[in-house]
Image (cartoon, rainbow, N blue to C red):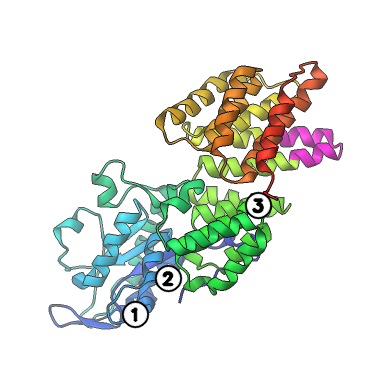
Amino acid sequence: MAEQTPLGGAATSGADPLCFVLMPFGRKADPTGTMIDFDAVYQQLIAPAIRDAELEPIRADEEMTGGIVHKPMFERLILCEYAVADLTLANANVFYELGVRHAARPYSTVLLFAAGTRLPFDVEIDRGLPYTLSATGAVDNVEETRKRLAARLIAARDASVDSPVFQLIEGFPQIDRLKTDVFREQVHYSEGWKDRLRRARTEGIDAVRAAEKELGEPRDVEVGILIDLFLSYRSVKGYDEMVALAERMPRPLARTPMVREQLGLALNRLGRRPDAESVLLDLIKDRGPSSETYGLLGRVYKDQWSEAKAAGETFLAAGLLEKAVEAYLKGFEADWRDAYPGINAVTLMELSDPPDPRRRDIVPVVAYAAERRLASGEADYWDHATRLELAVLAKDEAGARKALGGALAMVREGWEAESTANNLKLIRQVREPRGEVVPWAEAVERELLRKAAPPT
């Protein structure tokens, strides 16, 4: 059974990252006949070293029955941030699990083995950490080896590629880099549940709640279905339900970047700004910068700015606006191909008083990123929306009308069009007092809001 995560709202972000341990268990004889107590190796060496590295150990053997690798095992192999594999005795199950891990994760897997273990050629290219055994099969020099293992795990945080698959096959995909908006389409699972949740999203939040009730306990549900349910609540603005579902997910799944990002989004939509900020900042600390995470963090600061402005707190609002701009800029710098944080930075620079002159340098880069995506044939709604927002900023009516048609045709969920309409409204409202009236701008907003409106 997979552990549950005690989120308590934002508590997930403060939990230690998970480290999955792949190893034999019980007492096993090596080729010389020496009995090795692998439970003692785990308890005296591996688990303490993992905790020294400020990680939380999860051992694999609890998921094994009759030598069969079960669904929770695969989920943990793929989703846990770190892993330690003890290759002593060249155990077939451990090597199978290591192969799955190397195919799913480019880094953060540390290899360990008892000195004298003969490793297969394919694994010898990795730098494993040996430990020595006494004549009775106990671990020698436990403290020294524990420190070395902890150091290896700490070094693994720097994301140096250790998987032979990722080292030798250029461009091999990473599971944790799947974009949130296409995750549902990328994960294969029951077509019946895909249709069920698709219908529920069109019927509203009560239908999605009914689907969740029918599914039962999250730990018994396929990962693909859980993710679709999670994002279905986002579609119907069920942010309380998103937080509650994250609390009940198996912890390895709840710790994935995508779930943590969307938890941050949900907390922010609920007005829980400090909790949302904490979740996203902790994710950046754990994983490093990404365009998606910084984009969501920028939205937290943007909403705080809007609230301060509405309350007449002028100086606070100015500081928060700059904070939002910087977060969006960091997101754009993390991945220049993702125009979303870039266009948000440019729009907020336009809202500054006076407008931030840096926007003139950034606009061409944002435009190029969006146009490249559009030319690739893989563009989504946000690429068309970026083109639309750029046209409005440039006061280009013909370009805006053309981009509007493309954006409307690509809307998947109503909140997307609503988000763009709100940005365009902010631009219009800040320009009108400056005497920059754009007569057609409000009509563009209305078209977007009409698309955002739920069906009656």
Measure the alpha-carbon separation of dots 1 and 3. 41 Å
173 lies above or below 403: below
The residue beneath circle 2 is 58
Instruction: Report the residue at 84% width, 37% height from top.
Output: 313
Q: Is residue 104 magenta?
A: no
Measure the alpha-carbon separation of dots 3 and 2. 27 Å
Q: Main secondary structure of the magenta part?
A: helix
> Whole-percent x and y of residue 162?
30, 51
Q: Secondary structure at mark 1?
A: helix
The residue beneath circle 1 is 40
Label for residue 153?
Answer: none
Residue type at mark 3: give it: Ala
> Whole-percent x and y of residue 326?
62, 33
243 lies above or below 178: below
Residue type at mark 1: give it: Ala
Instruction: Quadrant for residue 130, please give it.
Output: bottom left
Q: Is residue 228 left or right of residue 420?
A: left
Label for residue 276?
Answer: 3
In magenta, the rendered stretch is 305-323
